């Protein structure tokens, strides 16, 4: 990797934190008020996967995260800085970072999406059904798969393990071209919320 990614964190007013980067990640600043809006930004989608997230802005050289009052920045700043650094370094290793593409291609009728959907329905959902859960395919863009968890998986404290150990592994084994699987679920609204 040619560029080393540095992340500098600053607390701002109103439960907001700003993560400055030494690399450019977008051509413009885009503000996301929900996980659904954030579907087109892989880093914003990842951050919305945490139930304490209320809003995310992704700008050319920084990310602003607004959090819920019940969690403190002294708990979040270091792991979130690490997540952002790791995400951007991975994107740079692939050649480029573009966090705010104009829109997510959500056409699930293309051959790749259809094959991924078939694996989800035949291999993943039968396993999750035993726990009262399921996942649905939201879209595929630039070899990144966007999924939503539902039923017992939405808000379940084990959803991160389910994603990393089950869903990601199954999809990447079946489709080596897939670079990442992003969970865009609002886990705070699930049947078994994290907190």
Image (cartoon, grey):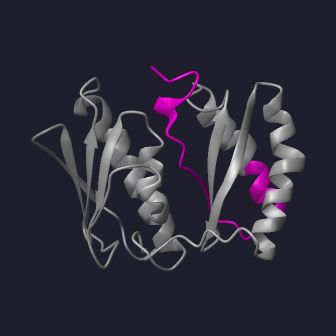
The foreground one among 170 and 156 is 156
* Residue at (46, 78) in percent of width and height: 96
Picture quadrant of residue 41: bottom left
Magenta-colored span: 169-195
Q: Where does the image place residue 155, in percent across and percent down from the top left?
A: 55, 29
* Residue at (76, 76) in percent of width and height: 110
The foreground one among 154 and 15 is 154
- Residue 176 visible (yes or no): no
Above/below status of 105 relative to 161: below
- Image check: 111 left or right of 162? right
- Give the residue furthest to the left: 13
- Image check: 177 left or right of 69? right
Q: Where does the image place residue 95, in percent across and percent down from the top left?
A: 50, 80
- Image check: 58 left or right of 155? left
The foreground one among 120 and 88 is 120
Q: Where does the image place residue 150, in percent across and percent down from the top left?
A: 65, 37
Picture quadrant of residue 146: bottom right
- Give the residue furthest to the right: 122
Above/below status of 140 relative to 147: below
* Residue at (75, 58) in percent of width and height: 172
Picture quadrant of residue 2: bottom left
Residue 188 highlighted magenta (yes or no) = yes
Q: Where does the image place residue 85, in percent across and percent down from the top left?
A: 38, 56
Residue 9 highlighted magenta (yes or no) = no
- Image check: 89 left or right of 154? left
- The quadrant of the rendering that contains the C terminus is top left
Above/below status of 46 relative to 26: above
């Amino acid at each position: 990797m040619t560029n080393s990614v540095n992340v500098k964190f600053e607390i701002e007013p109103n439960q907001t934190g700003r993560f400055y980067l030494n690399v450019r990640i977008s051509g413009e600043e885009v503000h996301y008020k929900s996980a659904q809006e954030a579907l087109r930004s892989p880093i914003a989608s990842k951050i919305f996967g945490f139930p304490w997230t209320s809003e995310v802005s992704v700008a050319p050289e920084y990310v602003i995260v607004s959090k819920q009052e019940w969690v403190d920045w002294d708990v979040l700043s270091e792991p979130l800085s690490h997540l952002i650094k790791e995400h951007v370094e991975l994107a740079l290793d692939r050649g480029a970072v573009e966090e705010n593409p104009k829109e997510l291609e959500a056409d699930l009728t293309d051959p790749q999406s259809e094959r991924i959907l078939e694996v989800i329905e035949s291999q993943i959902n039968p396993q999750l059904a035993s726990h009262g859960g399921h996942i649905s395919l939201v879209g595929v863009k630039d070899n990144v798969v966007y999924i939503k968890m539902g039923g017992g998986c939405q808000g379940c404290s084990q959803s991160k393990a389910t994603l990393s150990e089950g869903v990601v592994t199954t999809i990447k084994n079946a489709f080596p071209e897939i670079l990442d699987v992003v969970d865009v679920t609002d886990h705070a609204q699930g049947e078994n919320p994290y907190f």
